[in-house]
């Protein structure tokens, strides 16, 4: 029996710290295991009492004659450490440490936690906790409530992982009200050993789990997490993973010199992790359960297997008995990325046979307030069978003549005959309760308001798009990694941490970026000579370690066409720079041949200690921090990731030939994002960098780096 199986499906459990006093954790967990009807053998460990709730106690684990699969600890850290030594000798296979006072308080508690984990790993024992609520397996075959929550949830096909123990009891209460059952329920606390990724991988293989929900405060693994979860959410047997992350909007980035550093925070990091790994992020506990209900919705196929109902495309039909809610549903459907289906003529004709003259035969279908069960059933059957419809929402408002239960029965009958999702909004509480109960009992997602139903349908569509996405051909990229490394090491040896365009462009050139002829001038005359040599027009830029944002200092002049103008520009740039920062050390002025015009974009990178390089892409130029039209991805990025990042920004239309403009070279842009990701991974000395702007030319003509900056060896976040 593996460690995680021993934790969730143990044949025997020893509770170390079982108490005779009601109200103490050791007593309540013991009582919950008993009352929950645990099917295995339970051993209470307490050296000071003979029995608890009429069950014989044992002084220690060594006094138990039989094998013990799972040990649960509800004693102090010092006692837990000593008891773990006994548990190892007893050859337990799994452990749950409910007690607090470990890493979360620091000091000796943190030391003990490390000692316990080291001992357990050496013995091959997996640990949940410390500082957690415990675990619950409601399956009738196990029926284990090893937690200090008195509520034993009903069995179901949804598993829940939470880093917060306090939240768990509220979630259990919330789930009971929504008639939602669980396969596994676990609070992970300090994550000293088992973390979210371990549990996601275990639950993905669990035959009783169809959907995984998680409440996350902090992840400890970045790229490894993404690659592993991709196999869970989008592999051969995809399992939907729904996550609510606390503190996503907290200010996670420190003050930084780069645009990327200024725009990137914890929200961007976690959004990138979730999107790249196929996780569906939600904003509230309510939404978490709304989506879980929809994802748990399955249909028995002709071969006897149950298949998850997801829409193939985003074309939805709405059937309602009230105009107002139908309009709300229509607006919400469109705003969530769905669209109203256009019915075939045959569907409209079929609707006309069964609906009154006052009914609306087009989408949304209004069956009128006095609709009978037959009218609802006939309308729903007609639209769900239309080849232009991928799913349907059924809205019901209770009227005095509405037979809510009979309508629900008709919906269930049709739902069993189609692979397309049907989601309901029965608006009300008391008057619709019997119908809602019938829908829930038959696994049909039902919501109080149409907005929630529309959001759930949209989540199903996004998931369907993710699992059916087409694989793209990866780039075969070749780099001069050694030369780039030599440049970076050479700068560090000279004490140079800020790479401007001279060294920065040389590094980018090693990774396939198209760069412009660029030289440093230290006098007006030298600037004119460089311009004459490289050709006009040129752009000139101040070079100073103290002036990072050159435009702010008046340190950039564009489109210079002759030597005289170049000399004047040199003097003006130096003068502007001195006014901007009197103490700035001016190294000279860059003279750079101007690139062919193109769409200005920004590429950037910011490195995080836990997650590695965070890559940014967006609309570039001087207004990047005003418009903030950017997207993020965690390295390593492949071509598919790059495509998503490009299409995610609002300015994507600019690359598609907007209002007669040429179509941009999007393939080169994709290649540039992947190359930047590889550059960041291959050279960990780079802390931050921006390429702004990267000028993207028309299709087939590539892209050109117009400006860049690279920062080396700053403290990792």
Image (cartoon, rainbow, N blue to C red):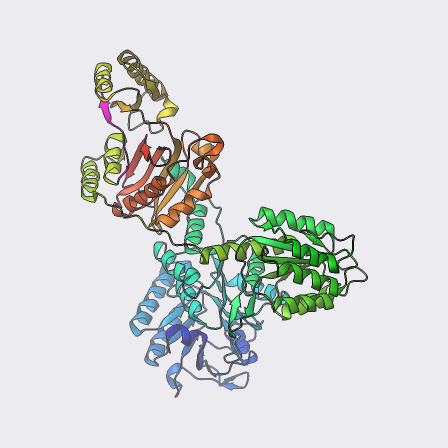
Left or right of 349 in this view: 699: left
Answer above or below: position of 498 versus 188. above
Magenta range: 512-522
Give residue 39's position: percent from left, percent from top: 50, 83
Give residue 541's position: percent from left, percent from top: 31, 23
Residue in view at x 44 percent, y 53 percent: 274
Asked if residue 3 lies in the magenta stretch, the reply is: no
Left or right of 174 in this view: 143: left
Answer above or below: position of 626 versus 328. above
Q: Residue furthest bottom?
A: 65
Left or right of 326 in this view: 636: left
The quadrant holding residue 467 is: bottom left
Q: Is residue 270 visible?
A: yes
The quadrant holding residue 566 is: top left
Quarter holding the N terminus?
bottom left
Answer above or below: position of 109 versus 154. above
Give residue 83's position: percent from left, percent from top: 37, 75
């Amino acid at each position: 029996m593996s460690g995680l199986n021993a934790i969730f499906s143990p044949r025997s459990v020893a509770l170390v710290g079982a108490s005779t006093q009601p109200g103490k954790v050791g007593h309540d967990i013991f009582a919950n295991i008993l009352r929950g009807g645990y099917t295995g053998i339970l051993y209470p460990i307490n050296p000071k009492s003979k029995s608890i709730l009429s069950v014989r106690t044992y002084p220690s684990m060594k006094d138990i004659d039989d094998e013990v699969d799972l040990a649960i600890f509800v004693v102090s850290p010092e006692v837990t450490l000593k008891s773990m030594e006994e548990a190892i000798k007893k050859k337990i296979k799994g452990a749950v440490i409910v007690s607090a006072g470990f890493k979360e308080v620091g000091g000796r508690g943190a030391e003990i936690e490390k000692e316990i984990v080291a001992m357990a790993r050496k013995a091959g024992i997996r640990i949940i906790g410390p500082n957690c609520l415990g675990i619950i397996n409601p399956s009738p075959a196990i029926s284990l409530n090893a937690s200090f929550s008195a509520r034993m949830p009903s069995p179901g096909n949804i598993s829940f992982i939470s880093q917060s123990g306090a939240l768990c009891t509220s979630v259990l209460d919330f789930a009971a009200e929504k008639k939602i059952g669980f396969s596994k329920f676990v609070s992970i606390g300090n994550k000293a050993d088992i973390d979210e990724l371990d549990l996601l991988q275990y639950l993905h293989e669990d035959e009783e789990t169809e959907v995984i929900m998680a409440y996350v405060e902090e992840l400890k693994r970045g790229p490894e997490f993404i690659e592993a979860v991709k196999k869970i959410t989008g592999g051969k047997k995809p399992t939907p993973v729904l996550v609510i992350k606390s503190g996503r909007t907290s200010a996670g980035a420190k003050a930084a010199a780069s645009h990327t550093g200024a725009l990137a925070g914890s929200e961007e990091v976690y959004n990138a992790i979730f999107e790249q790994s196929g996780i569906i992020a939600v904003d509230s506990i309510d939404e978490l359960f709304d989506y879980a209900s929809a994802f748990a919705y399955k249909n028995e196929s002709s071969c006897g297997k149950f298949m998850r109902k997801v829409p193939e495309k985003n074309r939805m039909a709405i059937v309602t008995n009230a105009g107002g809610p139908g309009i709300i549903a229509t607006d919400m459907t469109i705003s969530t990325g769905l669209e109203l289906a256009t019915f075939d003529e045959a569907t409209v004709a079929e609707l006309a046979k069964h609906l009154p003259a006052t009914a609306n035969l087009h989408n949304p279908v209004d069956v009128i307030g006095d609709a009978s069960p037959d009218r609802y059933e006939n309308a729903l059957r007609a639209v769900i069978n239309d080849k232009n419809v991928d799913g349907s929402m059924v809205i019901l408002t209770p009227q005095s003549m509405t037979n809510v239960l009979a309508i629900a029965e008709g919906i269930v009958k049709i739902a069993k005959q189609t692979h397309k999702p049907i989601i309901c909004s029965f608006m009300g509480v008391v008057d619709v309760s019997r119908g809602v109960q019938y829908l829930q009992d038959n696994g049909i997602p039902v919501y109080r308001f149409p907005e929630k139903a529309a959001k759930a349908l949209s989540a199903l569509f996004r998931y369907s798009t993710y699992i059916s996405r087409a694989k793209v051909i990866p780039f075969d990229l070749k780099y001069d990694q050694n030369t780039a490394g030599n440049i970076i090491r050479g700068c560090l040896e000279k004490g140079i941490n800020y790479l401007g365009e001279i060294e920065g462009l040389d590094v980018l050139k090693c990774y396939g970026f198209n760069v412009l002829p660029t030289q440093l001038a230290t006098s007006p005359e030298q600037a004119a000579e460089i311009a004459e040599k490289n050709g006009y027009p040129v752009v000139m830029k101040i070079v100073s370690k103290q002036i990072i944002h050159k435009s702010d200092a008046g340190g950039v002049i564009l489109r210079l066409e002759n030597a005289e103008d170049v000399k004047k520009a040199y003097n003006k740039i130096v003068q502007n720079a001195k006014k901007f920062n009197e103490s700035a050390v001016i190294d000279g002025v860059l003279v750079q041949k101007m690139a062919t015009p193109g769409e200005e974009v920004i590429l950037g990178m910011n490195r995080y200690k836990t997650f590695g390089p965070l890559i940014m892409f967006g609309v570039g130029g001087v207004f990047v921090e005003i418009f903030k039209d950017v997207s993020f991805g965690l390295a390593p990025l492949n071509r598919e990731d790059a495509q998503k990042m490009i299409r995610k920004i609002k300015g994507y239309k600019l690359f598609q030939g907007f209002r007669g403009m040429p179509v941009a070279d999007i393939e080169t842009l994709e290649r540039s994002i992947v190359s930047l990701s590889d550059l960041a991974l291959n050279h960990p000395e780079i802390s931050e960098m921006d390429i702004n702007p990267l000028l993207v030319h028309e299709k087939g003509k590539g892209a050109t780096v117009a400006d860049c900056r690279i920062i080396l060896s700053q403290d990792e976040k």
